[in-house]
Image (cartoon, coloured by chain):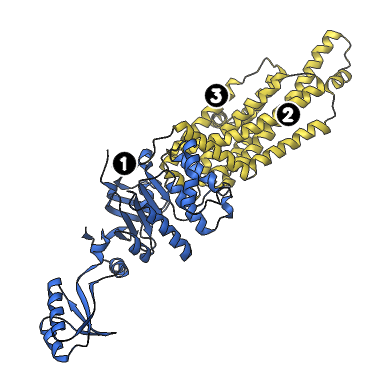
Chain colours: A blue, B yellow
Amino acid sequence: MTSDFAIETDGLEKVYRARFRGREVKAVSNLSLRVPAGVKFGLLGPNGAGKTTFVKMLLSAVHPSAGSAWIYGKDARLPQSRRPVGYLPENHRFPIYLTGYGMLDFYGSLSGLPSNELRKRIPGVLDLVGLSDWGPVRIKKYSKGMLQRLGLAQALIHRPRLLILDEPTDGVDPAGRREIRDILNRLTGKGVTIFINSHLLSEVESFCEYVAIMRKGELVLEGKMSNLLAGSGYTLVVSNLPSAALTDLREMGATPQPAANGIALQSPTREHANLLIDKIRAAGGLLDSLKPSGATLEDLFLKATASDDAISERAA
Amino acid sequence: MTDQPRKSSNVFFSLIADTFQEARARWLFWGLFALSSLLVIIFLFALQIDLSAGAISLLGVQSTSRRIFNIQKFVNVSYSWVAIVLYVWGTFLATFASAGLIPSVLEAGRIALLLSKPISRTTLLLGRFFGNLLVVSLNHIYLVGAVWLILAVKTNIWEYRFLYAIPISIFIFAVLLCVVVFVGVISESAALSVMAPVALGLISALLAQYPIIIKLLDSEWARRLWMILYWIVPKVFDLGSALKQLIQLDKQLDWFTPVWTSAAFGFTVLIGAVYIFRKRDF
């Protein structure tokens, strides 16, 4: 069975029960999500939102209390559903007794690659992550950034169709982050679905096409990044504008406000913005900038995770 | 496109090889080897006993036919006691060495990655089990084989039954390893994983004294409980006795009962460990 979706979940839920006291904690609640194949998807949420539990349920490391999950149409509980998956866990503990080469050989074999194929692929993957000289060195000598890149290499060794990265740049310095982002960018266009679980908003905003935000185990916002960030109008910054023209602009429905280099005007539609521009130019004013007014991911995140009654907003 | 499935036997082999590599890296393999070598060296240099000459001198037998019989018996008894030493030494040392290998694989950042691979949890756990068994088996073969060779060269009596210590030691270790795995899966504690099988070994020695003990117990339920426990607990002591009898050519030998009851115990515990491992969240 094939599917247009790399990941599909329906009413996925995880309840942890305290062993003796019988107390229940809902880590993930009724989560239904579809991740289209071939996209870059970011899952955001504050600490304890249930992101890692959700990922672990996809990979069957945690058993759902209710609901179902599919990976490319296959029941996520089946081992073969994980064949197209490459995974880099958060706080990983790779076997430090192995060399970089040995680690790729081990995890590659568990992913289903025969030895002769691994021998061919390992040098290439080490080169891709910039560790070609470090293959024969034991992992315990690796820095944090190198470990992340090696972890990425083990996730890529079997050429997965779905790459799940749990906090891939956590604890990595800015240069290391850039390197990881560059590696991921190289995969773009090859049909690989990249699912990033992160709390780094800027990273997700700059890289992902789709985003979902979780809060207290629930999905509170989901959609295409461009749609979610798009505002409902345009912002014009003008200068050299006569005061008479300002009055006319106010009458046209614009709301002038002081800006750093002149006056900022808000316009609700494209047509209205064009009418304003005609008026400004006719009055001898200068248009300094014109851009769609919209929110940042941080605005969305704070809004979605702040209120108790945040309602799931679909903007597909 | 993702690659075609690899044979599950190859995945299993990778898991076994990884356990072996970890045992080497953690110095468990070399530690066992070194301690076994210590025992071998003791036999090689410290035990300056000529069994044949010693037997002749000790027994003071004159008749040729009777002398041969008694020498043979004396040598067999000596061999059997050496085998028991190796059985106890090898089994408990191996149990101590194996205690950390299951909890180590259950560490949070490690198990999640292993479970993300297209392998079943049963394969994962059994790969670890058999990898561990392989490490210890190689050590048992080395230890018993080396001591046997030294004794044989020294006495010129090539008593092949001494080598039964290898399969019997490996078998009882496999049974105790089932307990290590079970406790490791439940508790993730290396200390507890070693305490449980060692305690079972000691308890088995106590329970095996049932012919004496049940006569001392005054209530029927206590006698029954003792016998039930005797049948349940793996027979570490009884198998050691069976090994001794096997080498001594004792006609009263009963090795089948301790083998099948211990195997049933180990199998049940291992099934339980696999079941819990499959159900657990990591």
- Whether residue A90 is visible here, answered yes or no, is yes
Q: Position of residue A143 (x, y in %)?
A: 54, 58
Q: Amino acid at mark 2?
A: Ala
Residue at (76, 22) in percent of width and height: B77
Would you name the residue on which mark 1 appears?
A: A75
- Dot 1 falls on a residue whose secondary structure is strand
Is mark 1 in CB contact (under 8 Å) with mark 2?
no
Residue at (54, 34) in percent of width and height: B130
- Nearest to viewer (mark 2 / mark 3): 2
Q: Amino acid at mark 1?
A: Asp
Q: How many marks?
A: 3
Q: Chain of mark 1?
A: A
Would you name the residue on which mark 3 appears?
A: B260
Q: Position of residue A307 (x, y in %)?
A: 28, 68
Q: Amino acid at mark 3?
A: Trp
Is mark 2 in CB contact (under 8 Å) with mark 3?
no
Is residue A182 shown left or right of residue A263?
A: right
- Dot 2 falls on a residue whose secondary structure is helix
